Amino acid sequence: MPRRVVPRSGPSRLPALDADLARRWRWQATVEVLADLGVLDPGVDADSPDVRAVVGEVGPARGRPAPESARFLAAVSAGSTDDVKARLSAAAQRTSREAQVEQAANQAVNRLALSLSLYDEVPVLYKSLGVAQPTWRTREIRGLGLDPTAEADKAWYRDATSAELSERARSAGLEHVAGAGEQLPEAVRELITTQARWAGARRVRDALIRELYPEQCNQPQLQALTGLGQAQVWQIINPDFRQR
C-alpha cells in the first residue's frame, strides 16, 4: 500500500519558501536588533550603504559566523568602557530572551508542519519550510517518536502507509491542527525573523566579549556581565579551539 497518494484534506501542495523574501526578513530583523542594542542608530535606513558596510553578510542563524569586519567591530565597541559593558550585558540578555522565543517559534512550525504531513498528506513540505529534504525527513521521524539513526526505525518510516503514519502520529501525541496550511506561512516567517534576531544579538555579545578580553575585563568579569558559564565564555574567546 503506497504512502501519501492522494491528500485527504487541505491543499495538495504548499508554495515553496521564497528565498529572496526570506533573506529580506533576516536582514530587516538583524538591523532591528542591532539598532535596539545601540550598534546602529534608531530608525536607520536598513538599505543604506553605511548600514550594509557595518552589518555585512547575514548568514544562516545556526551557521558558523564569518570573521567580523573592522566596521562592525568599531560600531559594536563605540563609546566608553562602561557603555560597552552595558551593551554587552544588554546583548547577553537579548540573546537569552530571543533563544527562548526561537525555541517556541520552532515548536510552532513543527506542530503545524507535522500535522500537514502526517495527517493531511501534504507533499514536498520541506520546500515550504526552506530546509533540505533530509533535514525535514529527520524532523518527521523524530516527531513520530522514532530514532532517525536506527535502521529499523528508518525502514519502518520509509515503508509505512499513510494510515500507519497517522496512527503513529496519534500515538506519539501529535495534534491534528485544523487550518494548519493557512497558519504555516506566517509561522515560518516568525521563525525566520526570530532566528535572525537571536543570531544578531548573539553576534554582538560574542564580538564584545572578544573585544573586552583581556584588557578591559577578565574571564570572571565577563561571566558576571553575561550570565554565561566559564566554559561558554572561554569558547567564545577561543572560537577556533576544538576539544578532542
Image (tube, rainbow, N blue to C red):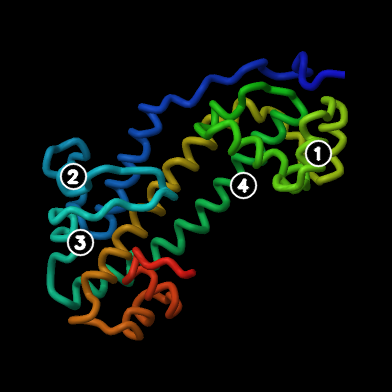
Q: Secondary structure at mark 3?
A: helix
Q: Secondary structure at mark 2?
A: loop
Q: Which amino acid is tagged 3?
A: Val
- Judge the density around disc 2: few (<14), some (14-19), many (≥20) Cα neighbours within 10 Å: few
Which residue position holds label 4?
Answer: 107
- Judge the density around disc 4: few (<14), some (14-19), many (≥20) Cα neighbours within 10 Å: some
Dot label at residue 169: 1
Q: Are marks 2 and 1 in contact (CB under 8 Å)?
A: no
Asked if residue 144 lies left or right of residue 20, the reply is right
Q: Position of residue 85 (x, y in %)?
A: 25, 75
Q: Judge by depth and name the residue closer to the eye, 137 or 37.
A: 137
Q: Position of residue 223 (x, y in %)?
A: 38, 80
Q: Residue at x 33, y 79 (%)?
A: 222
Gap in angstroms between the C-alphas marked 2 and 1: 47 Å
Q: Residue at x 75, y 31 (%)?
A: 118
Q: Which amino acid is tagged 4?
A: Gln
Gap in angstroms between the C-alphas marked 4 and 3: 32 Å
Q: Residue at x 78, y 47 (%)?
A: 145
Q: How many marks?
A: 4
Q: Secondary structure at mark 1?
A: helix
Which residue position holds label 3?
Answer: 76
In the rendered image, the vertical position of residue 56 relative to residue 230, given as above or below: above
Q: Which of marks 2 and 3 precedes in the sequence?
A: 2
Gap in angstroms between the C-alphas marked 2 and 4: 32 Å
